[in-house]
Each structure stands twice: as structure tokens, then as C-alpha cells.
Image (cartoon, grey):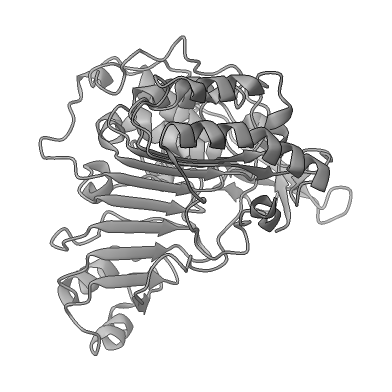
Amino acid sequence: MGASMSAFPSPPLLSHQHLPSGFHRRYRQSFPAWVFSRLGDLIPSTLPYLQFRDPPRRWTSGHHPTGMTHTTPVIVKVQGSSDHGSTLKEQIQSLPKDTKYLEVEGDTPSDVEWSILGSHFSNVKRLILRAGYNENLNDKGIPLHWPLQKLEIVDSASEVFKSPFVLEGRVSHLSLFFTCGLRFEGLTSDEIKREHDEAIESGDAQAEYITVHEGIPEEKKLKFTYLPELVSSHINKIYADPERGLNEPPAGPVNLETLEIWENDAIDTFNRMAISLPHQVDHLRTLRIRSTGGIDFHYTHESVFREVLPQLTNLKTLILAVGDMFNDPSYLPTLYKVLPPNLTELYFRGPSSLCQSTDWLEWVQAFESKEFLPNLQKLAFVLDLHWEKEEDFWKKDGPAPASLLDQARSACQPIYDIAKQRDISVVDMPAEPKSALLRPVDERWSQG
């Protein structure tokens, strides 16, 4: 696994003092206008595009996550255009109409393509949407007559969900794999850009330009749009709207029970979902978050996560793998204080350096109390993640030095011993998809 980016500096955004207590139950509560940050300071030094769609850096999956299922999907390739109808019809005409497991790749389907897929397939229960090179998301056309139970979004970036399967929690299992900058309310990215262009034409906004070929006869200025900053401004307006608090949750039942968010801005995505769809987050039974690349928190403050976690009283299983990317040095050493109170299963993976914190013994002391996670039945606790010395804003991850890994393993032993005394089973971390970007648990961890 290659280099990963360290956390961008986060301005003082929403903190736990500002987030309303019990916010997930207060559906009429509006939020401060500064929940989401401005991203102007995150413009990269090189400008590969004139219209920036994404946060400055992120990883894409490179291939479909495998190894988590024993079944094989029926794969359909789309082009994301409205004139691809005849080709798509020819492609799927021989495929079983009662297909239960469908993977769509190549691009996100256009409205026309969704209509064709919906007319042919009638029984899709598990759907994988691979965004492809364009990294778009057009989920509003997912056929509502499909008995969808699990929805997996792969590589989509900088777009807003529109499907009732997501916004109304109709699907029971939602997995976001190497997505980035996805939102759960507001305008689409194209609508935001169109609104900005109209503001420029009316004189309410100023266009920005860059100079190319400077100093030679071909020199010229090009107009460019930095979409993340426009998105940030758009979201600020949403949360500043005094009428927003009048919105009620969907009338129907919430089916969402399992949420997985894999890498890139995983915690930030969860924060945005918690603010936009609190009724769904409140309903979760299983939450899996993996954020080890250090490119989280482009939009929300890291403290939002700490405020939300202890309010997840329905959550039974938490699978959390996090790197040392927090601005607050006490964030991870004191994370035990905000764990959901009714967990029956906790799987935690963190940096080896956590054991060197002056607060580390508090983790051990917390487990000594039977009032701490009193319902816990299974525990995995691994500290094997490591990053080499920071260069500029990059950190290179890799195996922890043997001495540090041994220290971390020894530091965790008292927790294992206490867990066994409390009749808590000490287990391994759950299996992960096979991906070159997902570093497995260090083999040395179980050899001690």
C-alpha cells in the first residue's frame, strides 16, 4: 500500500458544545450555518482540472471489493448516456430476469439505462454500483420495485444521494466503498455549478481564473470552478435555513440496520449522514467505519463523531479502524469515553502509538469496570497501524517497527485478560474485502 495523506488542517467548525444533545431524536432541530467548512485553503498546488469535483486527494478502490461473499454477481456494463439503450438491451436480454445479485459497472447508469434495467430485472436484492472513471452517482433511478436489501456504492464522489433506498432508509444494508464527498441532502453538483454560473451572470458572484502558458505567446486565462467550496457554501445555506427544522422524518419504517463506510472521508461521511438523516443513524444496529488514510474531515469537525457515538443507543456492533489523523491529540486516547453504551460486539483497530499515550491506562481501567460496556460479548482490540515520518502533508503507512508493535501488543494484554474475566470473548478482527488499498492486520500481531 502506498503513501497516504495526513489530515488537512481543520478550522474550528462544529464542536460538541454546539451539537444539540440528543440531536438524533430532535428531528426539528436546525444546525448552525458553520457545520460545514470552507475548503478554499485545500486547493491543491497543481490544477489538473478546470472544474474541480472532488476534495484534493483520495483513493479509488481500483477494483470491486471481493472476499466478503460466496456468491457471484451478474455484471452489467453501462455507459452513463441516454443513447446507450439498444446496446444495453442486447447485453441483458439473455440474463435471468429474476437475478438477485447485480453489479453495474463502467459508469453510473443514466435515467434511460435505469429504466431498461428496471424493465428487465425484477428481483434484485443486492446491488453494486461501480462509478467507473467518471466517479459519478445517479442513484435516483434505482427501480423502486426491486426488493433491494443491500446497496453498495463504489468510487462515487462529490455528489448527493437521491434514491429513497438511501434517503428513506428502505435498504437494510448500505456500504460505501472508497467513496468521497457524498452528501445526503441538497442540490446535485451540476445544479450547484449551474446556480453559481447564474450568480456570476447576475453579478452576485465573481468568476475565478487561472493563467496557463504564462510568459509565452500562448498565455491565456481560463475560468475555473472549485466545486468543493461551492458545495460547502451550499450546505451552509441549508443549515442556516430557519425552516429546515420543520422537516419531519419519512412516514414509513426505517429499514437501515447496517452501515459500512470504507476509507477516504469515512468519518466525515458518517457525520454528514448523522446530521442529514439522524433518524436512520439512530436506527443502526451495526456500524463499520474504516478511516486509516488520513484524508478525513473535509467538511465536518472531528468532534462531531465523538458527540454522535454515545447517542447510538440501538447500536449493537461497532467495527472501527482508525488512523492517527486527529488534530486533537487526546481524541483516540479518550475515545473509550464515548463508545455506544449498549454494544454487544466491539472490534477496534488503531495505531500502535496509542499505547504510548499518557492516557493509555485509562483504557485498561475502563474495561475493569463492569459498568463499562456492560453488554459486551465479543471484543477485538488491535494496535498495529503505523505511519512513517511525515513529509510535507503526506504520511507513508507501513509495518510498525518490531519494538513498537511488541509494546502495543503487551499493552493490550491486560485488556484481553480483563475481558476474559468478564466472560467477553476475545476474537480476531472481522474479514475485509480483498483490496490492495486495505492493509490487513499485521501477521506479527497474533504471533506474540
Measured as percent of width and height from the top left, residue 74 is found at 32, 78
For this orientation, the residue located farthest to the front is 421
Q: Position of residue 25 (x, y in %)?
A: 24, 21
> Farthest residue toward the right?
215
Quarter of the N terminus within the rendering: bottom right
Q: Is residue 76 left or right of residue 425?
A: left
Q: Looking at this view, name the residue that lies furthest to the top.
A: 17
Frontmost residue, 229 versus 272: 272
Q: Is residue 230 left or right of residue 311?
A: right
Residue 331 visible to an observer of this rendering: yes
Q: How many marks?
A: 0
Relative to residue 222, is residue 234 drawn left or right? left
Relative vertical location of residue 6 with respect to residue 28 in this rendering, above or below: below
Residue 428 at what x, y percent from top left? 51, 51
As drawn, 271 above or below 88: above
Residue occupying the point 37% across, 39% down: 377
The structure residue drawn at horizontal position 13% and vertical position 62%, both measured from the top left corner, is: 145
Q: Nearer the viewer, residue 1 or 163?
A: 1
Instruction: Establish if 375 lies above or below 222.
Output: above
Residue at the image point whose x is 55% and y is 37% from the top: 416
**Residue 443, horizontal then vertical, whole percent:** 67, 58
Kindly indicate the quadrant of the structure image that contains residue 131: bottom left
- Residue 200 seen from this side: no
Q: Eyeballing the image, is 147 above or below 122?
A: above
Residue visible at 30% across and 72% down?
Answer: 102
